[in-house]
Amino acid sequence: MSDDQTEEPVIIHYGILRKSGRYPWGSGGNAYERSTTFLGMVDELKSKGLSAPDIAKALGLESTSQLRTNKTVARNQIQASNQAQAQRMKDHGVSNVEIGKRLGMPESSVRALLAPGQKDRIDVLETTANQLRDAVGPGKHVDIGAGTNLYMGISPEKLNAAVSILKEEGYVVHNVQIDQIAGKGKTTTKVLAAPGTTYRDIVMDQSKIGTMATFSEDGGRSYIRIQPPLSLDSKRVEVRYGDEGGSDMDGVIQVRRGVDDVSLGGSTYAQVRVAVDGTHYLKGMAMYTDDLPAGVDVRFNTNKTRSAMEEAASSGKAPNAKIAAMKAMQKDDNGEIDQQNPFGSAIRRQITEPDAKGNPIVKSAMNIVNEEGDWDDWGKSLSSQMLSKQTPRLAKQQLDKTYQSKKDEYDEIMSLTNPVVKKKLLESFADDADSSAVHLKAESLPRQRTQAILPINSLKETEVYAPNFKDGESVVLIRFPHGGTFEIPELTVNNRNSEGKKLLGNALDAIGIHSKVAGRLSGADFDGDTVLVIPNNNKQVKTSSPLLGLKDFDPQKAYPGYDGMPVMKNKQQEMGKISNLITDMTIQGAPHTEIVRAVRHSMVVIDAEKHKLNYKESEKANGIAQLREKYQKQVDPETGKTKSGGAATLISRASSQQRVPDRKLRSAAKGGPIDPETGKKVYEESGAGYTKVTTNPRTGKTTTKWVGKTNLSTKLAETDDAHILISDANTVMENLYADHSNRLKALANSARKASLSTGKIETSDSAKKVYADQVNSLDQKLTRALRNAPLERQAQIIANTTVKAKLQANSNLDSDQIKKIKNQALADARTRTGANKALVDIEPDEWEAIQAGAISTNKLNQILNNADLDKVKALATPREGTVMTDAKLDRAKAMLANGLTQAEIASALGVPVSTVNSALLRKG
């Protein structure tokens, strides 16, 4: 052997392609030899006439897909070895012909091995394997299920090959079931874990299942990671304490204009997290200001007093009072700052710029949770907690509108001709109608909008700066939850206020109010709190004067904690209990003197955890037990015994939890999941459970008992007639809601029954040719949408972990609270993981292709499962709508530049404010 051949071949991994059993393939040789042996065995078996399944079985593999993966790994192994040897020989001056002779290949193959970028392509497998190995790490696992390759930006073959490399190193893959947070079954996914990890290890702590946090834009050659936050020096941060004016702007982070590393990225305001000194962070609503002192670029406003923060610092909780007013960053299992989630909450985006190589570099310390325009789509309905505290006339009006809107939608869907689309929309409609029948939300009022609140203290306490509403009109502000009409301020819009114009301008979804107004809004602050803003010139939304018993009531002064007092850890549970009590009292006509007691206690509960208040003493002093006895007394229908506490009226009982036997929708073999006569869903019990063995410690006698598995549902979901949940008081409001729930359920059943009679779509070969571009476009969009699958699974894992922790800490939560916790946890997790960001957006010409039969039934179902069904409905049921033409948009921009508000622009153009805002956001 010549000198240029004395070096050993480069080996990507040791131990590749082992066979379970006593003697692995090629045992004792190097990676190249093992791979060559494996491929030789495959070729030999194939030459003997064995099929792929038979070859896989003969080699001890589980499937043909595993066979294909192992072949990919082997070919890459051989190619990597050949390429490394060829390059070394070339570097020593050996000719291509001679290299070919030594490697046993033609000269043309040597040229291919040495072609520019060839080594780079071979290294993709190694790079991807390294990414997976890093993602697993000590004590952690990673989701590698369906869609992971798309999220990583590589082919499924590359991912499978990289996984196989790790499996040969001893890493394990388990199929793990993940609960759907909304209670709709389980999702099974593949999880890659470190050597020795058992299935039980993974399922006992699913919080350790991560998703690939890297993405490749070049097919696996390199990967991009989420960037750590930019941190500010605390010397650039000023804290304005509560006793120095901070209480008037509690939660506001004021930012100097024109400074790049504190930029809000084009927004006027944003809910943010700001890292400070690499150890702490600020949480609140950021807005620009022009009155910061020299050397200060950020001012944080808090209701905490300077003395309290100095005391905290002197006790060693923080290096100084300024840092004591901030929150400590989250740490990982090693006690280090968790750079991937330092704030313990979802971050919507970072403000970045590409470097010379195009990699994103964080340029601003503002980590955005919500920004201008994000709140515009919130609050499109009226909750029963709000509407039931209004007049029966208003409630009936809005509930009737809700039903009629649903009925119109049902009639439109029934008129569709595309059977696949019709079936999908009917199924979706039925589920939505069922949900509406339980959640009891009503149609929004005209021009109602959800807006973030910010302080403009130059306004009068009777005014509001609200550019999305008409100057001079009356509006009401509603925050959830609220105790009653006495917590609904009615204000006059003043869009001429100079401070409002300067700080908020034409804010897309924020309003300015005097800080004292926030105090009436159930104790709101300015760190991202929102309110429902409803025009009220006709006075249909009822308000009332603040209750005298609440005037100047300060929970912190009235019920301070004491040394050694247990601090509240179940705020959601306690808040749900007192909110239900207030609702039940209001519906049953309790006098204001009693409602004051409940509201005072609710104000204590809201702040009890944060400010360590003595809520137990508040409950006792305000006679909450007596109020529950009077307004929430219930009779157990089985035992006849009475008890107090818990939901008492239909409004509060609707989503109260009820346990039902573990079940699943009836199988097709037993008649299908829908009753063809009634349209109702039909379930069959799973029979799951366990045998509980108990031993009497005194007698030693052992008994066994079968314990069936149960699931949580709600009382209203489990009854066909909502009237049975009405309280003994039998109020007008409860009957209105019961009738509403029943007719929505009937509509849902009609939709399900109709969905049984739809057929399949007739595909057309000629349509496929005519709409080839549209078909290709839909295929690409579907691929991008399927990339979301691992992100959604990760969101479900994160949300389940969050919910589990909260339920363990709060064992007596009602279904309303649990549902809220689940929804919040899932929304937060989806934002954190980036899930639900790539729906198939069907364009009009693509819809034509679908209607013409260019898409198969199976493909169309996949598209619909990953599409925005609201847009599908709009395409399927076209109707004339108000649009912003280019001419109108130009006029809108001109009027905006001349200082007109969105409300004034919308009035001039004859379109809704939301249409103006959407057009301005979309086209800039």
Image: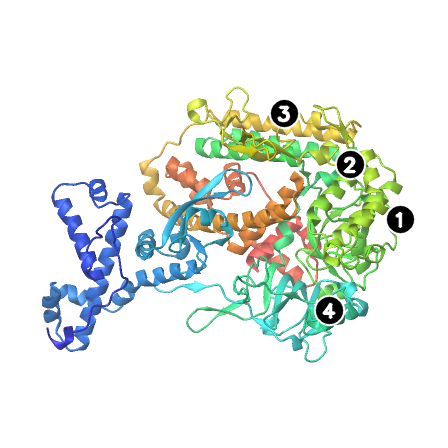
| Mark earlier in primary sequence (3, 2) | 2
- In the image, 900 versus 561, the foreground residue is 561
Closer to the chain start, of discs 1 and 3, is 1
Q: Is residue 66 visible?
A: yes
| Mark whose residue sits in front, 1 or 4 | 4
Name the residue carrying label 2: 584
As measured in the structure, the alpha-carbon distance from the residue carrying label 1 to the one carrying label 2 is 20 Å
User: Whole-percent x and y of residue 142?
Assistant: 43, 54
What numbered label is drawn on residue 312? 4
Residue kind at label 3, given as amino acid type: Asp
* Quadrant location, the N terminus: bottom left
Whether pointer 4 and pointer 2 mark residues with C-beta atoms closer than 8 Å, the reply is: no
CA gap, disc 4 and disc 2: 41 Å
Residue 720: numbered disc: 3
Q: Amino acid at mark 2?
A: Asp
**Vertical comparison of 877 with 333: above or below:** above
211 sits to left or right of 248? left
> Residue at (75%, 30%) from the top-left corner?
734
Say which quadrant the C terminus sits in: bottom right
Q: What secondary structure is found at the residue carrying circle 1?
A: helix
Foreground pick, 451 / 487: 487
The reply to whether residue 474 is visible in this rendering is: no
Instruction: Give whichever of discs 1 and 2 has the lower sequence position.
Output: 1
Q: Does residue 337 sit above or below 382 in this rendering?
A: below
Q: Amino acid at mark 4?
A: Ala
Q: Quick check: 237 above or below 532?
A: below
Q: Which mark is residue 549?
A: 1
**Residue most toward the top?**
677
Q: Name the side, left or right, on which 113 lies relative to 522.
A: left
Classed neighbour count for the residue bearing mark 4: other residues with Cα under 10 Å, few (<14), some (14–19), many (≥20): some
